[in-house]
Image (cartoon, rainbow, N blue to C red):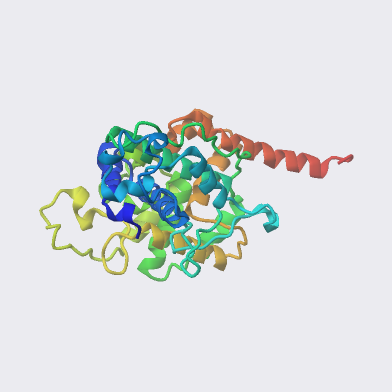
């Protein structure tokens, strides 16, 4: 780890994201990882190793910078642009796709064998820029800097992103690939039914509690991004799958720090989906489970738990659901985010029309 990270700055920034910004653990992890990667790159580049150039850097005074911050006193917009360029996917990459190294979470990570950061797509570059901009905003708030080096750096231009979507036949094939011979198979089927039937994010499915289920009323309470609560209808197939799993659900384990008298939201016996140790099933486990059953079903598309969410929304819109209703069910703050699924639907019927037109 470099001197800047060792100074505790990154730890303080992470606390700021978690406490003051109230970001989800996954978002905090992504932002912190982006900033740490930049700090590593910047230290290795040999820039900012002295107090020289403090007048151009935006520091109030070179003397006010903690010793560990000396490496950052000369960060400029040019440095930010250079870093983003260093992470860009080479134009010669086959199909323009980014090389991927996976840590088991589906997230891109620095290549541990070469020590070199892997190229990322323009979408990921935009996220990195957002992370760095947030970091330097915090630096200014803390009085370390007066100017944000990310100001004036343009967000990489991205084409419209159309997420991978499963057909209804492919969804059924994955569901049918799950063996219903033991409690784990029944659990996995219930998870898949809820991912597709309720349009849940993987972290939402992992965190579902028994006390969130209101089957008599036909809905599920979901805690989404930013700890925001929403109510989502649940269909009979998903409810039946959950009931079948509940009949054989194993006895949960109680961590020493969580006595049986704890609040339901903290108690293991209120967590719906458990692993073999009797504790909450992780999002990584759900990710791996989805990949496994997709492979068994012969699905060649690159899918993840989020693919079921995309498919859920697309199939609703294809069958005439109101866009505002889909927005509410997905928990999108802006309807512009939900509108992506209208483009998927349009692309579907456009392909169908062109493939059947006599003068295609």
Say left or right for 245 vs 195. Answer: left
Q: Name the residue at 33% across, 47% down.
A: 70
Residue 345 location in percent, x, y? 64, 38
- Left or right of 349, for residue 324: left
Across the whole image, how many numbered discs are drawn on residues? 0
Q: Nearer the viewer, residue 152 or 273?
A: 152
Q: Is residue 152 above or below residue 47?
A: above
Residue 161 at x, y = what percent? 60, 42
Q: Where the C terminus falls, by quadrant? A: top right
Res 10 visible: no
Confirm whether residue 96 shows in the render.
Answer: yes
Q: Where residue 325 sits: x, y (%)?
A: 47, 31
Q: What residue is drawn where x is 47% and y is 30%? A: 334
In this rendering, position of residue 238 left or right of residue 348: left
90, above or below 55, in the image: below
In the rendered image, residue 38, in percent from the top left (x then y), is placed at 43, 50
Q: Quadrant of residue 51?
A: top left
Q: Nearer the viewer, residue 297 or 201?
A: 201
Residue furthest to the right: 359
Identify the residue at the far front of this view. Answer: 52
Q: Quadrant of residue 189?
A: bottom left
| Quarter of the picture holding the N terminus | bottom left
């Amino acid at each position: 780890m470099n001197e800047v990270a060792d100074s505790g700055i990154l730890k303080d920034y992470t606390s700021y994201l978690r406490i003051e910004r109230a970001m989800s653990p996954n978002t905090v992890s992504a932002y912190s990882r982006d900033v740490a990667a930049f700090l590593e790159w910047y230290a290795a580049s040999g820039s900012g190793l002295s107090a020289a150039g403090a007048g151009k850097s935006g520091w109030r005074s070179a003397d006010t910078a903690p010793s560990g911050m000396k490496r950052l006193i000369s960060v400029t917009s040019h440095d930010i642009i250079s870093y983003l360029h260093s992470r860009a996917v080479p134009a010669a990459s086959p199909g323009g796709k980014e090389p991927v190294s996976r840590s088991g979470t589906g997230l891109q990570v620095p290549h541990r064998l070469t020590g070199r950061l892997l190229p990322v797509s323009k979408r990921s570059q935009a996220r990195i820029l957002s992370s760095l901009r947030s970091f330097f905003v915090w630096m200014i708030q803390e009085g370390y800097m007066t100017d944000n080096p990310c100001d004036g750096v343009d967000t990489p231009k991205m084409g419209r992103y159309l997420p991978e979507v499963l057909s209804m036949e492919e969804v059924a094939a994955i569901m049918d690939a799950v063996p219903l011979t033991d409690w784990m198979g029944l659990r996995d089927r219930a998870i898949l039914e809820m991912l597709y039937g309720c349009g849940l994010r993987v972290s939402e499915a992992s965190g579902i509690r028994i006390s969130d289920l209101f089957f008599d009323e036909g809905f599920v309470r979901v805690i989404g991004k930013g700890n925001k609560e929403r109510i989502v209808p649940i269909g009979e197939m998903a409810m039946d799958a959950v009931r079948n799993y509940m009949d054989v659900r194993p006895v949960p384990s109680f961590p020493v720090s969580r006595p049986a008298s704890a609040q339901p939201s903290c108690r293991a016996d209120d967590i719906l989906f458990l692993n073999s140790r009797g504790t909450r099933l992780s999002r990584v486990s759900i990710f791996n489970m989805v990949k496994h059953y997709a492979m068994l079903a012969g699905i060649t598309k690159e899918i993840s738990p989020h693919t079921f969410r995309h498919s859920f929304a697309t199939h609703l819109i294809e069958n005439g659901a109101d866009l505002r209703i889909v927005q509410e069910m997905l928990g999108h703050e802006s309807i512009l985010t939900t509108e992506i699924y209208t483009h998927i639907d349009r692309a579907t019927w456009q392909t169908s029309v062109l493939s059947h037109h006599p003068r295609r």
